[in-house]
Amino acid sequence: MKEDEIKKSYEELKFSEDLPERYLQAADLQEGDKRRKKIHLAPMLIGILMVGTTIYGAERFDWFNWYFKENYPLIQESADRNRYSTQNEHLKMSVENTVFTKEYGMVFLHIQALDEKGKAFMEQNQESLQIELAAENESQADTGGLGSRTRLCQEISDEENWYYLLQTINHKTSDSPDYETARVTFRSTDSMGEGELSDVPQAMELTFPVTQTIGTSYVFKQCEGFLEVSVSPLTVTLVWETEKSQFMQYVQTVEIGMKDGEWITYENQPETQLSPEWDAYLYSSDEAGKNILTLISKEILDVENIADVRVNGTVCK
């Protein structure tokens, strides 16, 4: 690497704010060498650049490519890659990537330990944290409650960084206005048992704008027994009115036929897991009897290649 290339790489690299201080502190610990050796800070930093680093401020995980893999380009233009952060005395919480449809929101969340107390707390509570995602529009009040789901991404977390997938719905249909804002709430644990961490991190709340929305690609108003069936690249949403509010008694099958002959199918099988095509479902209902079920696809639906949609065996129009 030429001298001017090294200089340019060093200037462009973004390090965490406390990196120089942390480096100097580490150097001071080398009691036997500190009088005989000079500290050469720039070469050390260049070495970090060349071999890679896990420093939080210098490296950013590519969420979308990890989660959606080769299908990510189908929604790339509608994804928000801005970072929104807040912190308390022991932990930093960052929303790193988000994507929203009219009915649904997905957020990738990063929690970093800032000190040993934060690290100890997360090691003990990482799988039971009370983290909630809500999305809303000020012009339309919530009428049926929201559904929220949080999953620890254990496979990419480490001893100082924890990653979560957050999902939410808010009793919305394709006719509802787009989300305007979203909010992630980290609720503090109220009490800790004997022998557990006594210094519990304070609660945190992070509100950020929903800057982009994936529009609904297909909306069917004629589907027997349903007010609406809508399909977006990430979700299938069904709306109906009936005294049988539980969708387990009402929605038996959802079938999406692709132009190449492939079928993506949801089948209601009580007490069994979802089929491989689906990641989760979120359900809400209101006092007026309107029920909304949102099926969340594990892979991005290529809506341009959908041939037809059927619910309970009926072709939707």
Image: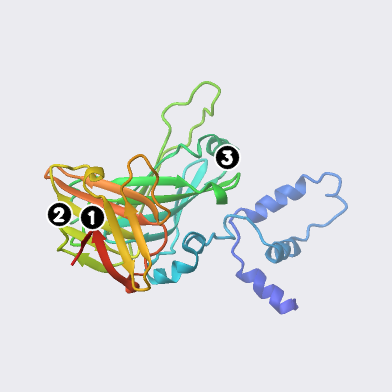
x 40%, y 71%: residue:
74
Q: Look at label 1 and name its amino acid.
A: Asn
- CA distance for labels 2 and 1: 9 Å
Question: Badge 3: how crowded within 10 Å, few (<14), some, or many (20+)?
Answer: some
Which mark sits nearer the N-terminus, 2 or 1? 2
SS for tag 1? loop
SS for tag 2? loop
Residue lying at the far top of the rendered structure: 194
**What is the x, y in percent for residue 22?**
67, 50
- CA distance for labels 1 and 3: 49 Å
Task: List the residue tagged with mark 1.
Answer: 312
- Quarter of the image where one finds residue 57: bottom right
**Badge number at residue 119:** 3
x 39%, y 72%: residue:
77
Question: Badge 2: how crowded within 10 Å, few (<14), some, or many (20+)?
Answer: some
Task: List the residue tagged with mark 2.
Answer: 225
Q: Nearer the viewer, mark 2 or mark 1?
A: 1
x 49%, y 68%: residue:
70
x 37%, y 50%: residue:
280
- CA distance for labels 2 and 3: 52 Å
Q: Are marks 2 and 1 in contact (CB under 8 Å)?
A: yes
**What is the x, y in percent for residue 202?**
44, 37
Q: Look at label 3 and name its amino acid.
A: Lys
- Number of numbered callouts drawn: 3
- Quarter of the image where one finds residue 117: top right
**What is the x, y in percent for residue 274?**
38, 49
